[in-house]
Amino acid sequence: MATETHSTSSGQAKACQNCKNQFTIEPEDFNFYEKIKVPAPTWCPECRIRRRMIFLNQRTLYKRSCDLCKKTFISLFPATSSHPVYCPTCWWGDAWDPLEYGQEYDFSKPFFVQMKELVARMPNFGPQTMYTTLVNSEYSNIASYLKNCYLVHNSDYSEDSAYAIFLERSKNCFDIYMADEAELCYEGINLRKCHKVFFSIDCQDCLEIYFSKNLRGCSYCFGCVNLRNKNYHIFNKPYAKEDYLAEIKKFNLGSYKTILELRHELEKRQLLFPKKYMEGVQNARTTGGYIFNSKNTFESYEVLGVEDSKFCQFLFISPTKDSYDITMWGGGVSRSYDCMGIGDGTDNVKFSFDVWTNAMNLEYCLHILAPGSNLFGCMNLRNKQYCILNKQYSKEDYEKLVPMIKEHMNKMPYIDSKGRVYKYGEFFPPELSPFAYNEAIVQEYFPLTKESALEQGLTWMEPEDRNYLISKKPGELKDHIDDFNEEILNDIVGCAHGGKCNEQCSTAFKIIPQEFQFYKRMNIPLPRLCPNCRHFQRLKQRNPIKLWHRKCTCAGTKSDPSTSSGYKYQNTVSHFHGADHCPNEFETSYAPERPEIVYCENCYNSEVV
């Protein structure tokens, strides 16, 4: 299938081979592709993200037996998987040799057909964990150095926590999306160095905060937005310490009804204050969202310590340098392109998934978790070099054969069920993923219905028949946490969504002991949604992985009334542009039709610092 292109003064416009929408390849992009010796992409940036994400199952877990030792363990793959699955002990053990699965390259078949054959025969890595570093935390995935954690994924160095994603160096935290150095926090998004922060978003260096957003260096604040270094505030109004404590006691925080009302109040209040066009600090020349300590990094999302890179997501371990289209991890990554889950010193890695530990010069590889170099189309190898499709070659034969394979990939490309063409330079086709669309992380950030997924040639996993014997319907739960004792631990609670949502609802859940103790200690009411639905509700509060070009909505002394809310924010000080409309423009993840008041960094800082 040909991809339409035409040149513009600023780059080359192409029609995406997948979604058919146009995207532009800029001159600096072509410079990068030429430097690392790959062709320009035929899929747009968003479709490339989706294609990579289909290969990562982050939160869908199954109980099954190991196909080698037969012991039961928690796995990313159900018992019905068509390929072998090993528990962590067996996968890392010496009872099998990945080179025994090696196969000769066959120039009569497309490369991806042969890769698919190899993947089908090879044992899969049950959970993606450093299992020897997990203590009482077997229900966790993509994790290391956890202790007493339950359903904590993509996290490290944390303990006594549950229901969290991207939790780093934290303790006693529950229902969290993205936190670092947090303790005793609940229902939070993007918390950094926080203690006792509840139902809050984008807070840093904070203590005893409730129902707040965008606070820095604050203590004892309730229902506040955009405060800096403030204490004892309620709804942005200052109080004396004694008066503040007396007012807080009037809120019935152990009541579920009260919590719903206060969360709704925060949703309304945060629309009354300007938002910075991009969440992030200590950056230079960056575009995207949640970018920290980075420079020359564009169209990227939730990254830390990234330089001279573009189209990257979820890189929480620095540094990452001179790389494009890297999703997940980081940590010494350099000169790499179009990969999912790589880090720990990897260099010059392309079109690969799950590669760590100083690997270099890899293409089209899966699960290379020990040092390796000069590998092409390999899976599960450790401490190997000069291999193709898990077959060992001499250095001379390897360097002769790899260019021939790339030429063969262009002459005999793989064509999927929807007619999409995969030559050299494309990431693995979604058809090679062992996961269905709704099992993989892609469903969390780019959700589809079953019908839409199947229409796009993607697979869908039907949920298992659970048939839970629900002993407490959500409407039967008492309102206040004080009304419960440990007998609730014996109940199976029905999820309020009842499986009628698109959020991987488990239909029922149990309150675990450490969770119940936390609720009692912190005076927090019991949840009415299952952990999956709670996770998806948090995801809805973050901006999408997408950018729009917009102008600052500061119109002089007030905000522009053109926002969909119709509300005009009154500036508190004079800005650099005086009474005139701010001239600044930017790329932002706030869509133009959204109701938020979006300011450039200069105007925003004038109002909150």
Image (cartoon, rainbow, N blue to C red):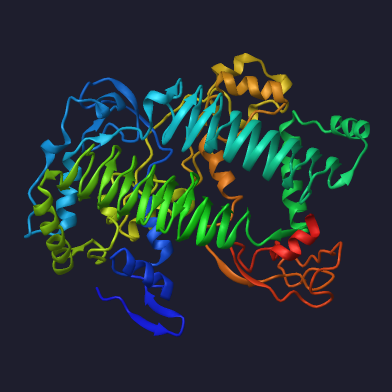
**Which of 571/448 is in front?**
571
Left or right: where does residue 602 sit relative to residue 474? right
**Residue 453 position by quadrant:** bottom left
Residue at 11%, 44% in the rendered image: 391
107 relative to 503, above or below = below
Residue at 55%, 65% in the rendered image: 547
426 relative to 495, above or below = below
Q: Is residue 429 visible?
A: yes
In this view, which residue lies farthest toward the front? Answer: 396
Left or right: where does residue 103 sit relative to residue 430? left
Residue at 10%, 48% in the rendered image: 394
471 relative to 375, above or below = above
Q: Quadrant of the N terminus?
A: bottom left
Residue 3 on image: x %, y %: 30, 75
Residue 363 on image: x %, y %: 25, 53
Residue 25 on image: x %, y %: 41, 73
